[in-house]
Image (cartoon, rainbow, N blue to C red):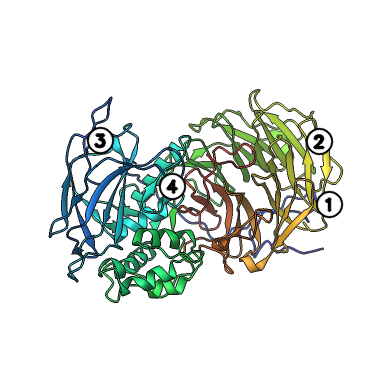
Amino acid sequence: MIQHNVSQDPHKLKLYRNIYVVQRFLQANLLVLFPTLMLAATGCGSAVVSINSGSNPIGATLRGKVYSGQHPISGASVILYQAGSSGPETGAVKLLKTPVLSGNDGSFTLSSDSDCSSSTAQVYLVAQGGNPGSTSTSNAASLLMAALGDCGNLSDSSVIQINEVTTVASAWALAQFLGSGADVGSSSTNATGLRNAFLIANSLANMTKGASGGPSLPTGAIVEANKLDTLANVLSACVSSDGGSACRPLFQTATVNGIAPTNTLDAALNIVRHPSSNVASVFNASSTQPPFIPQLAKPPNDWTMTITYTANGLNAPTGLAVDSTGSVWVANYFGATAVKLSPTGQPSSPQGFQDASLHESFGITVDAQDNVWITNEETTNGVNSGHGSITELSSSGAIVSGSGFSGGGIFWPQAIAADSNGSVWVADYGSSTASLLSASTNGSSLLGSSGIAPSGMEFPVGVAVDSANNAWFASQGGPIRITQAGVGTAFSCGCAYFPSAIAIDPSGNIWLTDYSTSNVYQFSANGVMLQTLSASYGIDSPQSIAIDGAGSAWVANYHGKSISGIGSANGGATSAHLLSVSGFGIDSALTAPFGLAVDASGNLWVSSHTGNTVLQFVGLASPIKTPLLGPPSQP
């Protein structure tokens, strides 16, 4: 039997412990977190225009400057757009029929010809071409952008600076919505995801100052500013030229599928969408006199961008779940708390939501009413003889479950998942059973007083729901499927010796992680093995797994201090932009990554278990509809 040294690995998978002995986490150091003050998330920190209610006409002037580094760009065509709503990467509407040219000092003043469709329509500025002052020729390859945010927040009280920093910040945050030539759009059903993405752009950069770190960024949050400035310097080498030979290194390194970009914004978009491609070559394409400092001293591991959030109440954070607004809920192993972060990382409660029923929490899910369900492996309040419980909170953090739900066979619950029928499935490690609780009738059991123990179920640690509302459990030896009628089917593979998590993709395929072998397995819905992935993808002690809207799997590498991306086997060849032999995020502050969740903006959220933080990988994944009530789907 494999021996697991918990003194070296504070990892809560107790597959080999005696069923009656409770294995404790060991925590060498706990960070002392300070209260986080949060700026109001207005969606825009830059000069824009006043909006009248009703028809939403833009009634004031927009002022700003176009810069390359620290030098003004004259003669640039500046135009205001509203993001489209007919699909991703398309449908943007010009709010200015005739572009305004920037002056010799880079300044521009414009008034819109058209109205915004609503006060929450997302608007942005684009500056194309112009002379950076270092040449007598206009640079047709220069395309810069500044993501502003809500049309209703526009005013003329300050100015906007469009430059390389605002451009790369917009490219990262809007990676899942931005098409070629600055065409921004989302589906009509994902206005929330688009709006949150614009907020994140204003966390990455200040659109007024043209500098990294914006007004939507909470106090204490950390942006990889050096990486952002470095990529801005890479763009600057091209923007500050006549668009000829100085742009070739950038366009060559940003070539995708043999097609080279022809402007700087498209180049930035290619780089952030393929963060492990030509990393050193991109770095070496930087300006010889970089205008933005400090920049990286050497090439990064990859071109992903993270924001690290701290909050009181984060205490050995574990599972993550996203609600319909894009807010992220965090379960914590210690501290008797649950934490809710806004889409920009602002905590909803100064100390987290505290309750005695929250204890040794791992699993978390959000149901269709945005209520939050959390597994407590053990209880200290006398409930269920110390064998654990389920806590339910309202969307505002109020306790709905009293001292905790414990009926239906709850016994050391590890994982939980909500379905579209108004039920929640629970993996009971302690009794090797599954519980099914009603979300509408105070957590009452739908599978009897003891749950169900199908043949082959051994120490389940993960659960996911398929399109038929069947539950799939991560069990020793292979996945187990259980119908809502309680019929269980085991798919033995002899591969999952130390399972840690399970997920289902949009095609109905099953993904299973094995912590001990550092393998990730993909099965068909019939239990046929499709592929096995290991260290070649940077996988190292995988703790959790999440699937995005494109069917790609994202894995938290607990010991690798990174995440890995894997394409689906039946979706063609593994996507090249997901490949990374060391995983993504090594440049960030990620330690002991535990939980994963994807939101409707395409951000990937990760809990840093020993760091007491939550990290957001900006725009890295394909958006999904939240909350997750079965396989992921496009929002």
Question: Which callout, 3 or 2, points at the residue further toward the start of the chain?
Answer: 3
- The residue carrying mark 3 is 114
Q: Residues within 10 Å of mark 4 (few under 14, many from 20)?
A: many
Q: CA distance from mark 3 to mark 2?
A: 61 Å
Q: CA distance from mark 3 to mark 1?
A: 62 Å
Nearer the observer: mark 3 or 2; the answer is 3
Q: Residues within 10 Å of mark 2 (few under 14, many from 20)?
A: many
**Residue 190 appears left or right of 264:** right
The amino acid type found where label 1 is placed reads Ser
Q: CA distance from mark 2 to mark 4?
A: 46 Å
Question: Which callout, 4 or 3, points at the residue further toward the start of the chain?
Answer: 4
- Using the image, tell me which numbered label, if any, was put on residue 436: none
Q: Residue at left 39%, top 61%?
A: 268
Question: Which callout, 1 or 2, points at the residue further toward the start of the chain?
Answer: 2
Question: Which callout, 1 or 4, points at the residue further toward the start of the chain?
Answer: 4
Measuring from the top left, give residue 499's x and y in whole percent.
73, 54
Measuring from the top left, give residue 294's x and y in whole percent.
31, 69
**Residue 64 appears left or right of 311:** left
- The residue carrying mark 2 is 452
**Residue 185 appears left or right of 499:** left
Measuring from the top left, give residue 505's x and y in whole percent.
65, 47
Q: CA distance from mark 1 to mark 4?
A: 43 Å
The amino acid type found where label 4 is placed reads Glu
Front-lying residue, 410 or 120: 120
Up-down: is 580 above or below 530?
A: below
Q: Residues within 10 Å of mark 1 (few under 14, many from 20)?
A: some
Q: Residue at left 79%, top 49%?
A: 527
- Using the image, tell me which numbered label, if any, was put on residue 89: 4
Front-lying residue, 228 or 372: 228
Q: Residue furthest left?
A: 104
- The residue carrying mark 1 is 492
